[in-house]
Amino acid sequence: MPLKPAKPGLLRRLPPLLLQPVRFVPHFLQKLVIEYGLNQFFKESIEQQELHVLEGRRVLLDITDLKLRLMIGVENGRPGLVKNLQLPDVSIRGNLEEFILLAANREDPDTQFFQRRITVEGDTELGLEVKNLIYSLDPDRLPAAVNRLLNHLGWMVEKTRAAGL
């Protein structure tokens, strides 16, 4: 008889519980914070005009444990949060931990996909472009504070998973 996977402990359930109210933040505040983060995260890609493949496209990031859905688009070479007035070209779904590991370059995104921890629906070619773009970012080129935060969050996710918390 196969063993049933254990439910995550409080430590792994706590961040989503604490962050769930984020979905009630007004759109203009979400837009301000998320666009700042996206512009920091993709600073080099913006400067080198590498985001042209995403121009006018819509990518839905669905962070399932937060019940937070963010529609990201690129306009005039800059990434930003857009209202959900159109269907996304591609939807990328997963829990917060998976997105942290992806952004922190702590785990191969193909592993996450094949283990069904991250799912991609819609234009899979566009999803592949997004994955390759994120995976190609050199963490050392990110602003130091962003790099430290991502490293710390990635380390925390790895440690809590290893400890089964």
Image (cartoon, grey):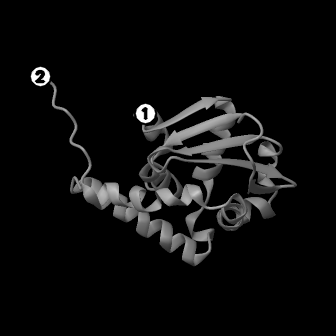
> Is residue 25 left or right of 111 when viewed as pictured?
right
Quadrant that contains the C terminus:
bottom left
Q: Amino acid at mark 2?
A: Met
- Measured Cα–Cα span from mark 2 to mark 1: 22 Å
Quadrant that contains the N terminus:
top left
> Is residue 61 left or right of 13 when viewed as pictured?
right
Q: At x 62% / y 36%, what residue is drawn?
A: 91
- The tag on residue 1 is 2
Q: SS of the residue at dot 1?
A: loop
**Can residue 104 be seen in this snapshot?**
no
> Is residue 156 left or right of 10 when viewed as pictured?
right
Is 70 situated above or below 26?
Answer: above
Q: Position of residue 62 (x, y in %)?
A: 56, 43
Provide the residue designation for mark 1. Answer: 116
Q: At x 46% / y 52%, what residue is drawn?
A: 96
Q: Earlier in the sequence, mark 2 or mark 1?
A: 2
Question: Image quadrant of residue 33?
Answer: bottom right
Q: SS of the residue at dot 2?
A: loop
Is 31 situated above or below 97?
Answer: below
Question: Image quadrant of residue 46?
Answer: bottom right
Q: Amino acid at mark 1?
A: Arg
In the image, farthest residue toward the top: 1
In the image, farthest residue toward the right: 76
Q: Position of residue 155 (x, y in %)?
A: 37, 64
Q: Give the class, few, some or many, for how many residues have Cα within 10 Å of label 2's Cα (few <14, many ≥20).
A: few
Viewer-side residue, 64 vs 41: 64
Q: At x 75% / y 56%, what residue is drawn?
A: 79
Q: Position of residue 106 (x, y in %)?
A: 44, 56
